[in-house]
Structures are given as C-alpha cells and as structure tokens.
Image (cartoon, helix red, strand yellow):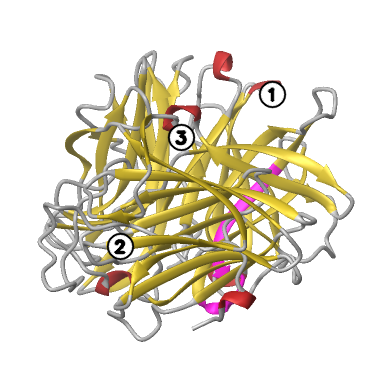
Amino acid sequence: MKSLSSICFLLIIGCASKQSSVKNDDASTISRPAFHFTPEKNWTNDPNGLVYFDGEYHLFYQYNPYGKKWGHMSWGHAVSSDLVTWKHLPVALGEYTDPSSGDSTMIFSGTAVVDRKNTAGFGKDAMVAIYTSHVHKGGNAIVQHQSLAYSLDRGRSWKRYDKNPVLTIGRKDFRDPKVFWYEPEQKWVMAVVVPDQFTIQFYESRDLKQWAKTGEFGHAGDTLRIWECPDLFQLPVEGDGGNSKWVLSLSGSHPQGPKFVGMQYFVGEFDGKKFTVDNPEQAPRYVNYGKDFYAGIVFNQLPSSQKRTVMIGWVNNWTYANDIPANSWRGAMSIPRALSLKKFANGYRLIQGPVKEMAVRASEVKQRDIDSNSALMIELELSGSGASGISIGNDSCLVRVGCDFSKQQIFLDRSLSKKFHPDFPSVETAPAESGDSIGLIIYIDQYITEVFSVDGRVNMTDLTFFPKKIHIETFGNAKLKTWKLN
C-alpha cells in the first residue's frame, strides 16, 4: 500500500449496485455496468466491424455463444443510436464446420464497411464484413485467411461469400484485417497483421474480393509481445490549421512489459500504399496506461458532419481474462472515446476524451459514503508540489488513483482491490507532464473505472471489484465534484 505522501490523485472504482449478487463483500459475481457495453450472456473480447450506417452505430464483437470463457469465436452484434444505449441483435457470423473436410472455422476479428458504390457487386449499400477465418481441426490451427460475408438488410442477416477466402498467404497466424475506403485513389485499403513477425501488411482492392500487396511496416516500437488488431486512420492536428497525420495503432504488450497486453501507436504518413513513421527511433507511444484496454479500433464511415474519429476497446487483459468474476456474461467494451492529435516538443501525441454523448449528468452527489446502483462521474482538480487526490473504498477494499506532482506521474493503484488472480493486483503509472496542477475526469461504472486527464494525453482503463459500501475521501489540494449519470 502506498502512503498518502506518495499519491497524487486518488480515485475509487466501480461501486457494486444494490441489486448485486455480491454477498459479504465477495466479488465472485458482479453487477452489470450501466453504460459500458456487455453481451446479454456469455463471453466477449475484441470489438469488430465498427461501422455507422443509416443512423445506427454497429458494434460487432468476438463472442462465444456457448459459454463464459473464450472459445467458438463468432461475431456478436449490437446497434446504438447514441453510443450509450445498445440494442442486442442475433449473432451475425457464427462458427461453422466444412461438411466435406470436417475442418471447423471460427470467425476472428475484422472490419465492416458499407459498400456505397457496389464495388463488390453484392448490392448498393451492402454491408460487407471482412474477417479472419481461423481454420482448425481438433483444436489445432491449420491456417488463418481473410474472408467476406455480406448483408443487404442493415446487418440483420448475413451470407458468406461463396468464393472465400479472398486473401491468404498460407500461414497459421495472419489475421485481424482493418479495411477502409481510401478516397484519393477510389479504392479499398486493408491493414492486416503477421503477429509473430511484428509486421503489418497493406493491400489494395477495387472490389473487396481481389487484393494486391502494396507495402508493409514492422519491427518498430514495442516488440516484446506479438502484434494484433491493427488500425490505420487519419486525424486532425489540433491548432495546426487543418493539417492532419496518419495514425497506425495496434495491440501488443503493455507499458509495464510483455506479461500484460496493451496498445501502442505510431504517427506518420500514408501514401495509399505504405505507412512511414515520422520518427523510427521514438520510444513507444501507448494508447492506454491502464491494464484493461485492448484491441481498440475506430468506427468506419462516420458522417462527415460529425467531424470526429471514435474508438472502442475491450475492457480486459489476457493475463486473467478467463478468470474475472462473472455473472451471466464475461467481458465488456470501453467508453467510446473521440481521438485527435496534438504536437508537443517531444512529438505528436494521441488526445482522447469521452464522446460528447457521455455528458449525461443527472444530479450532484454530496454524500461521501455511497451505497448505490448509480453510475458516477467524478471531476477532480488537483494542485500542489506533492500529492493531492481522492481515495475510495473501505478497509476490505481500497483503490487509489493519483498524480505525484514531485514525480510528474499519474497512477492508479488497485493493489488492495479484490484479488481473484495473482496477477490482478497492480499499480499503473503514466507521465503527467502537467506542472503543478491537473484536472481528471473519472467514470465509475460498477467494476469498470476509466480515468481521463482533462488535456487528453493520459487515459487509464482498469477493472476493479468493490464491496457494496464505499467511502470517498480527499487529501492534499483536491477539489471534488461527484455526479450520478443517467
């Protein structure tokens, strides 16, 4: 346990609800989050196929229809009109067995696009899924290749393309295609990863069916753990007269090393064929400093009127993902966050903040002892030369999030949270770069806490499991407001 003198901003995470099945402060089961997406039941991991079409945000996701642990990978499906409330739809793409060979195919991660120009010939405005077919026999992988399925009814029903696969290189590990429309050359672009070679390959196509390799990028940044789930997108640079840069993000190891998974990103240029990083020697940049944010991708085809790029990630960590407490479901998605870039003395940095739809304050909470089923947002203003912040919890379970101004370091300490796995207790840290003051916004939603610095440079997403009764306490130079969320 850290002493208060070493802590700058303390934050508690995830109050259990009154309807929780948690008894005697035991976190063996959990209450459903209010505004973080969870499946109705069973297991979920990576978000897939994020796309906007006809007034709906579509969230596809890795899903096991048969249990609460990883397996039988399929695409679950949900839609939303506001990125906050979601409607569950039937499984979009399910695991299947080839009747002739007996080989089974799981539906791994991928992309969805709306083919507005009918380039593939499936129909105008067909929704097309480009996904990894994970072909296996008796549980042993044979090959991974990229396949298509399409929908003509806004994603409600799907048909697999009868000439799959559309791209294969004959490897067991070749997956997670991210596809987008590249307007300057009127073509589709795919970024797909060769995980154990730390390489992202780029392909182009006019019809989503025939793909030609144009370049690759790899062996840069953090290579301590295999690469997965690449994404490539263009972002405006704040205060730079409308200029923009390209960002290549991917999932791999965590800032604390390869024992845990996390995400990193590179900033550079994309010419339609290959990505070139601005500074190949730059230290790795990480998307999230918490332990529980992975496989994040951005929405395809948001309306130009929105003028934003929105990412969602999986809230979990493979080190303990199959063991986290569960009720009828296991796994959740993050708060959607809007992305931009800003240039600093040490280079471009990814700026993140909750989408505007998350501004759903209901009423301010004055009391500091809380036994509530309400989702909460905490606004903190911290200052000083030492430590300031809040702590939340009780003697049996305490979580701290802070910023040590003497070290210019924000941290989230869940070492005294519930322990269901030996690797779960941890302390996460991130550079504050804030001088003698900082603002933090904290979202608390049952067992999920997300912390955003007001300047957008730091984001921490962590699981934390709490008893039903918690106490909020400030220390140092801290100004606190707590809000219930609708």
Indicate which disc, 1 or 3, sits on the residue closer to the N terminus: 1
**Residue 463: image x %, image y %?**
37, 63
Q: Which of the pair 210/230 is nearer the observer?
A: 230
Q: Amino acid at mark 2?
A: Ile
What residue sits right under mark 2 in the picture? 470
Compute the Cα span from label 2 to label 1. 56 Å
Q: Secondary structure at mark 1?
A: helix
Instruction: For residue 126, say whether it is visible.
Output: yes
Instruction: For residue 175, say whether it is visible.
Output: no
Number of numbered discs:
3
The magenta stretch spans which residues? 247-259
Q: Which of the pair 362/247 is nearer the observer?
A: 362
What residue sits right under mark 3 in the picture? 209
Indicate which disc, 2 or 3, sits on the residue closer to the N terminus: 3
Compute the Cα span from label 1 to label 3. 17 Å
Q: Which of the pair 25/418 is nearer the observer?
A: 25
